[in-house]
Structures are given as C-alpha cells and as structure tokens.
Amino acid sequence: MAKKLWDKNSTINPAIERFTVGKDRELDLLLAPYDILGSIAHSAMLQSIGMLTLEEKELLHHELRNIYSIVESGEFIIEEGVEDVHSQVELMLTRKLGDAGKKIHSGRSRNDQVLVDLKLFTRHELQDICEAVVALFDALQKQSEKHKDVLMPGYTHLQVAMPSSFGLWFGAYAESLADDMLFLQAAYRMCNRNPLGSAAGYGSSFPLNRTMTTELLGFDSMNYNVVYSQMGRGKCEKNVAFALASVAGTLSKMAFDACMFNSQNFGFVKLPAECTTGSSIMPHKKNPDVFEIMRAKCNRLQALPMDITIIMNNLPSGYFRDLQVIKELFLPAFAEIKECLAMATYIIERIEVNKEILNDSRYDAMFSVEEVNRLATEGMPFRDAYKKVGLDIEAGTFVPDKNIRHTHEGSIGNLCTEDIRKTMYSIYEAMNIEKARKAEEALLKS
C-alpha cells in the first residue's frame, strides 16, 4: 500500500481513513488534468528560482505530459491506499524520476494544489457552460424571429390576459439567458484568479514567483493575499453555484411553460416525438418527460448555493476538512447543467408551434385592452373606454380586432432581437475564454 504524503510511520484506523477520504478518490479523477497543468506551471517556476535544475524540470515536464496523456485516454487511476489525485501524480513522478519527483512539492501544499485544481476545473467547465448557453440563446432567437408574427395568449394569474406572440415567448427566454451570462461572467472572473503559491494559506519562505505561474496558467490575476486564497475556497464555489442556479432557474421556468403549452388543454406547441414517452395503459399519451426531468434537476441545482453556504458559513479563516464535502456537491453539478442545456437546445430547435391558436373564440377577450386603447386614442377617456369594453364583454357583443399594431421597443411588433443579441455577445466575448485555452495548450506542448 502506498504511503501518505504526510505519513510519519504511524498507523491509521481503516474506518477512519474511509470516512475522512470520502469520495475524494472518485471525484479527484475529474481534477487530474488540472493537477498536471498546475504541476507543469509550478515546476517551471521552481526551475526559474533555482529550486530545480533545467534537466530536472525537463524530465518532470516530459513525464507530466505522459501522465496527462494517460488521463486523456481514460486509463488514469488513483491506486488503492493513495488518498487523492495530488498524491497519485507525485507517486507516479517519484517512481519514474526519483528525487526529481520528490522535489516538485517544494513551495506548495495540497491546500493550494486543490485550490488551483478546482479553479482550473471550474474555469474549464464554465467555458463549456457559457458555450452551451450561447447555443441555446441562438436557438431561441432563431425561433423568436421565425415565429414573431404568430400570436398566442399571454397570461396573468394563469388567466387569459393580453395578446402575446411566440416571438415574445422565445425571445423572453433568450434575454433571460443574457442576464444569466452576467452571473456566469462574474463567476468566471472570480474563479480565474491564481491561488498557487499560497501553500497552506500562509505563503512560503521560498522566493516563489507567483506572477509567473499566473501567466503560465492563463489566469487574469492572482489571489494576492495568501490567507484570502484559502478563505476563497468555498466562497468561489458558492458564487459559481449562484451562476449555475441562475441558468437553472431560466431552464426550469421554460420547462414548465413547455410542459403546460404541450398539454392537450393548451395545444400551443408540439414537442419532437423522440423527446416524449408513452403510457403503459393509455395509448394516446405523449408525455414531456425530458422537460419534467429537466425541471426537477434544475430546481435541485437552484438549492446548490444554499447547500454550500451551510457547509462553509461558520468556518473561520484557514483550512478545514469540511471544505472537502463541498466537492461532492459542486463537481457533479456541471455535468448536470450541461446536460440540461443540451436537451433544451435540442428540443427548442425542433419544437413546432400552433399557428392557429387564436381561431378559438375563448381567446377573443384578450383583445379587450387593444380595443380600450383604440377608443382612448380616438379621444374617449381611458376609464370610460375601459367600462364600455367591459360591458360589451359581459353582454356578449364584444367583437375583437385581432390586428396588433404594437411598435414600442420590446413589444410584439418590435422584438429588439438584435439588441438582445449584442447584449449577450458583449458579455460573453468580454470573458476572453481563448486566453485561458491558449495558455493550457502552451503548457502541454512538447
């Protein structure tokens, strides 16, 4: 059995070890590529300050890239008895390179190792999520423009209220995602700061060059104060979770609408056949299971910030093992939100809308405000016009004019699609995702 990095020839109770390690060995497989990237940058910095020879650095980089290839192939494992990914990588380096492998831990702690791993992992996942959000945004905008002239009822209190349109409905969720992107941008910027060199939270007596590792890893800046670098663990995850929850909130609301509009009582939209399921006894059923599962998953994701807050809320400064439990909640959330985004995009691209909704007379009364406004425009006091139309509806004599003439910004006749698109893309492009990707690619070059 491999020894622990902290082993001092003492024996630990196996039950205690299982309890304290928890799911670290399983979840740390997600962090493996980022642990290697951090180690490449750290060893380059160690060589620059004389802690490694040039030959040792080159040997370490060659072997770290070999390990990265093993990770990419899916063959990387954390061996039995090895606590975490950091220990596994260092063990593999030491087996292959001897003393050079042992030197790589100079000037760092597993505390700042896991911090940089989490930052790099989260940064990468946020990049993927932002791209997925943009893909759904584009699909919604395309449908909004395609169906901008197809009217549908708008609701307040789940009562038929005023005319809306599929252009407005699709476009509303597109603009919601643009707001969500602001949260994602803030989360990305907060995440994209380098904690490496903070060691166990109090720095190191080695003359570390933190600016160098910041640049090598493509971070925007560093977490300057070494104590705050450690205090940022949990806080970073919580703030990222708020961004994920914002996206999840948009998806959940859209899923509810789609389920309701797909039902026979509404019949506003038709979901792709391959995205529905049937009943074991009712042959007519086409259930919107994808959106129902999406709604449940996204509602659960909206609880993530509070779950993290409860774990970290009463911790003082410094490192505590409580923070390990946050990984069990946090790391899997990214795959879940990405899957929901992919499903939503697939369906939105293929959804069919009912262009004949307003042929049903039950929706006639929703044009009442249009008539009130017409009368007011012609000079009748608004309250008199309101009363007249109300009495006509009660008497059954109201005849709707279904020609909508809205022109103000953001209304049925002026969706502001291009303005919303510019808003989304200005937020997204300001994140400068390519900078981080290019830095990582440079670290992996032979």
Image: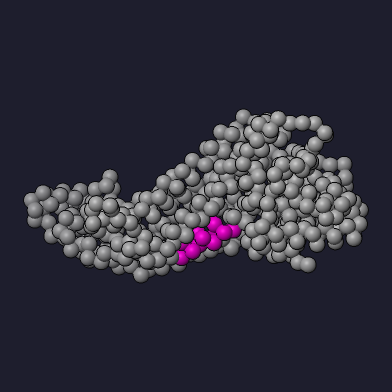
Was residue 137 drawn as part of the magenta stretch in this picture?
A: yes
Foreground pick, 23 / 310: 23
Single out the residue that lies furthest toward the bottom.
146
Q: Residue at x 44, y 59 (%)?
A: 343
Task: Give x and y (percent) for residue 166.
Answer: 32, 62
Foreground pick, 167 / 58: 58
Q: Is residue 340 left or right of residue 394?
A: right
Q: Residue at x 59, y 47 (%)?
A: 331
State the extent of the magenta-drawn residues as a range: 127-138
**Is residue 335 something one can see in this rendering?**
yes
Relative height, residue 135 to residue 78 (above, below): below
Was residue 136 drawn as part of the magenta stretch in this picture?
A: yes
Q: Split into 4 quadrants, where in the image is the C terminus?
A: bottom right
Foreground pick, 158 / 163: 158
Relative height, residue 144 to residue 17 (above, below): below
Q: Residue at x 47, y 60 (%)?
A: 342
